[in-house]
Amino acid sequence: MAEVIGVRFKDVGKVYYFDPDHTVLKKGDMVIVETARGIECGEVAMENREIEDEGIVYPLKKMIRKATEADLKKVEENRQKEKSAFDICMKKISEHKLDMKLVEVEYTFDNNKILFYFTADGRVDFRELVKDLASVFRTRIELRQIGVRDEAKMLGGLGICGKPFCCSTFLGEFQPVSIKMAKEQGLSLNPTKISGTCGRLMCCLKYEQVAYTDLLKTTPKVGAIVSTPEGKGVVVDQNLLTGVLKVRMDRAPEAAPMTFQVKQVKLLKDAQIRLAKEEIEKLKDLEDK
């Protein structure tokens, strides 16, 4: 067991563990810590608590100090520098005629490095741009290519639900989302219906997947052979949430399907949920690469 605090460096970023060095901290306190990128100022997202050794990546670095007024002032100064650096980098990108989109600029707390986050369709040779930026800022420069999900997280916006993006409000880390989830949840596989503003599958498909997976264990799938009070038939439609099945009866295959509740039928042979090759080809760009 070890005492730790959880520190976050972005408003909705991953939480990292640090040794509080016997200091009791509250959620929202600002602290100065040493990271792989150098000295950083972060916000306490998790107060002092004991964590099992298995959940910690050692060596666990100690907090340097609780942030002072001078530290917070420096953080604010860095935010202003980032705005200026963004404009300068945009001009340099234009001068070098690079096919890239600058998304965000970030100064490390100690100003030893400036990170420029960008998106691009493919690989970009930005070596000359780095040299140019280094000559302007006189410090270490790092250009980091990010994906469209990360871009959406940084920029924020409103989803089709009318609420702010999940990724920019509470999702600390992205969860893998697959086309199969949409298929299992009975959603239309229309790209505009199941993709977010970022152009990838909506993160919210992940939220209810556990419930749908559980319901699929007890609900015959489309194509399953079942026994009903009216005889044997094949499931042609299902509603997992209401437990309603539509069954095409063997004795009247041309007639309209009959409706039953799950508890009224007995499963004889279940079916499998499979994606057709055409569906995979059509939707392949929606999944993370």
Image (cartoon, rainbow, N blue to C red):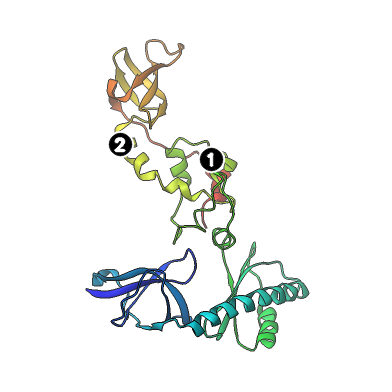
Q: Quadrant of the N terminus?
A: bottom left
On the rendered structure, is 98 left or right of 25? Answer: right
Closer to the chain start, of discs 1 and 2, is 2
Q: Is residue 142 visible?
A: no
Residue at 66% from the left image edge and 81% from the top image edge: 130
Q: Residue at x 38, y 23 (%)?
A: 245
Q: Residues within 10 Å of mark 2 (few under 14, many from 20)?
A: few
Mark identifier at residue 279: 1
Measuring from the top left, give residue 70's x and y in whole percent: 51, 85
Please identify the quarter of the rendering in which residue 53 is found.
bottom left
Query: Residue 146 is drawn in which quadrant?
Result: bottom right
Q: Amino acid at mark 2?
A: Lys
Kindly identify the amino acid type of the residue bearing the numbered disc 1: Glu
| Residue at 69%, 86% in the rendered image | 136
Disc 2 secondary structure class: helix
Q: Is residue 27 above or below residue 138?
A: above
The x, y position of residue 210, in whole percent, is: 35, 45
Above or below for 99 versus 196: below
Secondary element at image label 1: helix
Residue beneath disc 2: 217
Residue 284 appears in the rendering: yes
Question: Is residue 239 found left or right of 81 in the rendered image?
Answer: left
- Of residues 89 and 96, the one nearer the viewer is 89
